[in-house]
Amino acid sequence: MSAPQPGFLAQIRSFPATFWVANTMEIFERMAWYGFFAVSSLYITGPRETGGLGFTSEQRGAIQAIIPFLLYLMPVLTGALADRYGYKKMFLLAYVGMAVFYYALGQFKSMPGFLAAFFCVAVAAAIFKPVVVGTVARVTGEANSRMGFGIFYMMVNIGGFVGPIVAGVVRGLSWDYVFLASSGWAVVNLIIVSLFYREPTSEAGSATRRSLKQVLANTYEVIGNPRFGLTVLVTLVALMVANLEYPWFTWTRCAIFVAAWLALNFLWDAVLPAGSGRPAPPGTPARPALLQRMHCSNWRFALFLLILSGFWTAFNQIFLTMPEYIRDFTETRPLIHTAERVLGPGAAERVATINKDERAEIVKKMTELLASPDRDDAVFEAAARDLLQNKVRLRPAELRELFSAADATPDNVADRAIARGRQFNPEFIVNLNALGIVCFQVLVSYLISRFHQFTSMVIGMLVAAVGIGLSALAGDQGLTGPGGSVWIVCAGILIFSFGEMMSSPTSQEYVGRIAPRDKVALYMGYYFVAVALGNLFGGILSGQLYGKLARDMQRPDLMWAAFGVIMVLTAAIFLLYNRLALPRSAAHNLTGGGTR
């Protein structure tokens, strides 16, 4: 049990103006990011005829692994630069980049062009992330940090809730408006930071500020030396390339390459003198990087980040896999009927939007079917699968019935298919995650503030595992058979949200508290290494498991069960880590590598 905390209102009143400015900017930045990212799976795999990119699930997984991985890896450097050059300058640079590159993201339809624009968005977001979290860490203290990070995480999800709603509405007009909206939110933040933000760091104006060379050295000294970083980085790049499924670098060849690369590095270490990887004594020139042994200077902190990546691997499936899964496997008409009862007969047009391009594609498919001389069961099954791409779900028998009408024309059949089988926008369903956090995050943070951070994280992971695992019971195929319940999907997302509320902001608070005060943004940058690895592993698994299990085997239940198991294993490993890797006196401080 931790020391007694101040009351709820006392903690709220203790936050300075800069705290609230940073939280407001977080809302708009998340509106920009999730306005695109929540619909990215649908955009990337959507037909070109309706404005999508037309890529496969495996290609989608590769993109969503590589770019977010780089995004969350770069804060190691950008956080250190922010501590040195000032938070406000970095904010300004980030928002200008976001305003330009979110718009550019919608202008490229090929894989290389889209990846390049997405990477530029990632650079801008990577500049922003450690600075905003570092601001929150700097302006909160031991007495109010749990509440402060809880409020911050609630603001994250206000943006994460509103952004996809706006994107879901405007993509009913055109995909172009999704990118314009994200660019617009960045412009709003540019105005806010220019007028209201006050610098919380002092190094930028200090006479003892570090040189750029010292900043770069600090970025790797937290975890290890350059040899250690290079060995890990090449391994991860190999995984990314293998996931792109080039015939010259298959997963088998990747495994051989990684094994050989690691063996070569360990053999090279055996040749080098002992201790050559540790920092050189003051006044002594350092050995060249390649002549240093691999050295992990803070193995406890590195292990903490690696274990935490398991949480983010499973966490990311809500945004990477769930939208495509809902589109392809979940019957959502019950939600539309509920919306019509609550909001009126016109609600379907708002929550299950089908734009003119999607309708044109449906008419085209109906024309082809009417012209087909042989409309057997296989033809109707294939047509029913194609309609899912345009948010219409009909069983083959229902589709055949529409064609049996005396007045069946392409337009008539298309309109009746839309009226009968239109589906709820997947991004609106996934948005239950953000809605639950907006409603309950502050309360949850207040209730768990009396418990140790590790306790909160482990319990949260177990709750999240239940939420993810519930999706194994829903969908057109799997444990429940055809016609799975969308209500189970919704319940799973909400349960997952409570686990996320306990785990995610607490893990950020933990790193913010253990960091030296003059290196908060740097340490928060390292926190995002765990998120980066979670995005890399999560993106790879999302594309591969969705393609192999859900699409090819028609067993999405096995896919969701696997993601739930990953979360449970992460919680179990965290328990072992807390018991075996941390001496009692080190439980609140991982910034030193020695035995305590």
Image (cartoon, rainbow, N blue to C red):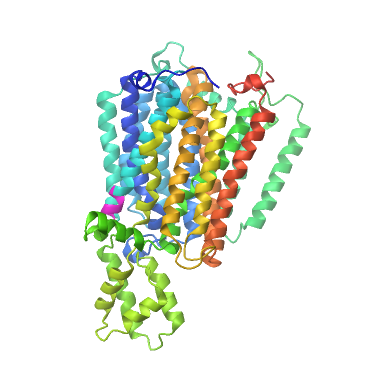
Residue 251 point in image, percent of width and height:
63, 56
Front residue of 20/445: it is 445
Q: Indicate left or right for 240 with 325 as reference.
A: right
The quadrant in which residue 185 appears is top left
Of all residues, the one furthest to the front in this rendering is 341
Q: Residue at x 26, y 51 (%)?
A: 177
Q: Is residue 382 above or below residue 177?
A: below
Where does the C terminus fall, quadrant-wise?
top right
Front residue of 37/62: it is 37
Q: Is residue 258 highlighted in magenta? A: no
Q: Indicate left or right for 28 with 226 as reference.
A: left
Q: Residue at x 37, y 52 (%)?
A: 429
Residue 354 point in image, percent of width and height:
28, 63
Magenta-drawn segment? 166-172
Q: Residue at x 25, y 54 (%)?
A: 342
Count of residue discs: 0
Residue 462 point in image, percent of width and height:
55, 41
Residue 310 point in image, percent of width and height:
57, 42
Could you tell me if residue 539 is visible in this image?
no
Could you tell me if residue 420 is visible in this image?
yes
